[in-house]
Amino acid sequence: MDTVADMRLGEFSDVLSSEAPVPGGGGASAVAAAVGASLGQMVASLTLGKERYAGVQGRIEDIVPRLEAARAELLALADEDARAFEPLSRAYGLPKGTEGERAHRAEVMEAALRSACEPPFKIMAKACEAIDLVDEVSRIGTRIAISDAGAGAAILSAALRAASLTIFINAKSMADREYAEDLLSRTQEMLDEGCEKADNAFLRVERGIRWPSR
């Protein structure tokens, strides 16, 4: 399979909807987050060089390349998520007829579950970074495209929620509950903080442009 960044949208949608085990929710969340970051970058790019926004040009010049980098990293993480699922998929198929086989399967499964959680955790971290930037763009960016910043925030919020589900389902199967609980705590913290900021940005934009106002 081509890298996600090299695939056409139709191709990605086709393979996502097929019986193929990957890409799945993790990869889809990374792509969605990249779309959200792209919308924020578009608004920032439209603000760049505009005399009316001279007072924020320094911040905009910093934000544009950071969102571009986040976008590229998120697409790369979609591929990383697919690669991380393969060992877990194989682990589920290991024999478990004897006590020795069950012990081996449990050991392999535990390692595979941890590895499978790493890409979605990175996706969430990168989405949170993008949310911070898109939130700022929604405050200082050109008003003619502010709805796109709000759309980007909404998509990033959904992507963050989607990525967390991969972590939750894998952590539920971990035998090491101390490790799992720590992972779940860190995941929930990102989820709560990131979604709150993204949802607030969306609501701020919505209230500012909606007619009649609520």
Image (tube, grey):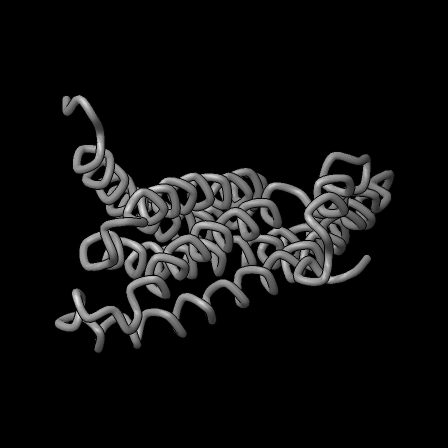
Q: Is residue 141 above or below residue 211?
A: below
- Image location (x, y in percent) of residue 45: 37, 65
Q: Is residue 99 left or right of residue 75?
A: right
Q: Quadrant of the N terminus?
A: bottom right
Q: Residue at x 50, y 45 (%)?
A: 163
Q: Is residue 56 above or below residue 80?
A: below
Q: Is residue 146 above or below residue 165?
A: below
Along the line of sight, which residue is nearer the eye, 86 or 142?
142
- Image location (x, y in percent) of residue 181: 40, 47
Along the line of sight, which residue is nearer the eye, 92 or 142?
142
Q: Is residue 207 above or below residue 201?
A: above
Q: Number of numbered discs present?
A: 0
Q: Residue at x 20, y 25 (%)?
A: 211
- Image location (x, y in percent) of residue 42: 40, 59
Judged from this view, the residue extending furthest toward the front is: 51
Q: Residue at x 44, y 50 (%)?
A: 36
Along the line of sight, which residue is nearer the eye, 173 or 63?
63
Along the line of sight, which residue is nearer the eye, 195 or 191?
195
Q: Residue at x 14, y 22 (%)?
A: 214
- Image location (x, y in percent) of residue 197: 24, 47
Q: Is residue 120 left or right of residue 132?
A: right
